[in-house]
Amino acid sequence: DIQVTQSPSSMSASVGDRITITCRSSQNITSHLNWYQHKPGKVPKLLIYASSLLYSGVPSRFSGNGSGTDFTLTIGSLQPEDSAIYYCQKSYVSPLGSFGPGTKLEI
Amino acid sequence: EVQVEQSGAEVKKPGESLQISCRTSGYNFNEYWIAWVRQTPGKGLEWMGIVYPRDSDTSYGPSFEGQVAISVDRSVNTAYLKWKSLKASDTAMYFCAPMSVFSSGNINHFYMDVWGEGTPVTVSS
């Protein structure tokens, strides 16, 4: 099975900072990679799909990049409401939608 | 508008069986995979598996194969997640979502953009 890892597992940053979260796949998944934001007690929210496409309604400070095995999620100017756990998800071959372990972001 | 409605909270004892549901509307139910995801504080989001309503084809994540069963009832546009014998470690929040598709050329990208509110399951003696 293709494994998905993330780094860092947690991080702390300040309002206005630019941060990057990394996701790595154990095999080539081309651009089949999604990013989600999950806050406690809430439903996970899709941010980015197909590696770099911004989902409708998501602020433009969020961006995704990468292909093959290495991917990044960048938040351009952190806002207080960006505190959450961020997950990458591969959407390629079985098991189709495996998630990374998550990155906890504290603002 | 796609809508996803999940069944309510459950409290069960170890060894009991359970089936929770995920009712959808606003799209062609037969044409889109439906996924189940487990969320626990310690392990985050875990991919449990998917079902294709048209032919009930299923695929499970490696940790869930043989532990749960995913099915559908096309007559009521509903997917189900079933346990035969619950364990305390099944205590979690369970989410479902139809998998949307973005097609680029002949390549399909799947993603989950409309989620149910989740079904909390507590298993305790």
Image (cartoon, coloured by chain):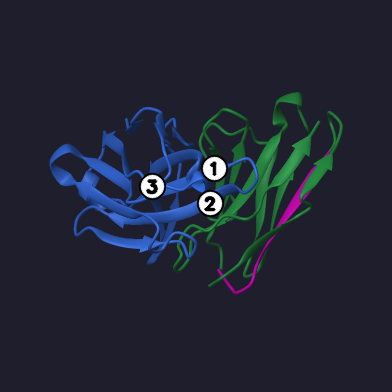
Chain colours: A green, B blue
Q: Does the rendering let one see residue A76? A: no
Dots 3 and 1 on the same chain: yes
User: Pointer 1: residues within 10 angstroms few (<14), some, or many (20+)?
Assistant: some
Tag shown at residue A24? none
Q: Which residue is mark 3?
A: B15
* Chain-order first, disc 2 or disc 3: 3
- State which chain disc 3 sits on: B
Q: Which residues are magenta?
A: A18-29
- Distance CA(mark 2)–CA(mark 1): 6 Å
Which amino acid type is shown beneath numbered disc 3?
Gly
Q: Position of residue A27 (x, y in %)?
A: 60, 74
Q: Position of residue A61 (x, y in %)?
A: 70, 36
* Chain-order first, disc 3 or disc 1: 3
Tag shown at residue B39? 1
- Distance CA(mark 2)–CA(mark 3): 22 Å
Question: Is disc 2 placed on a helix, strand or loop?
Answer: strand
Q: Which residue is mark 2?
A: B46
Residue A83 in which image quadrant: top right
Q: Nearer the viewer, mark 2 or mark 3?
A: 3
Are the two marked residues, 2 and 1, in contact with CB atoms closer than 8 angstroms?
yes
- Distance CA(mark 3)–CA(mark 1): 21 Å
Q: Could you say which is closer to the camera, residue B89 or residue A62?
A: B89
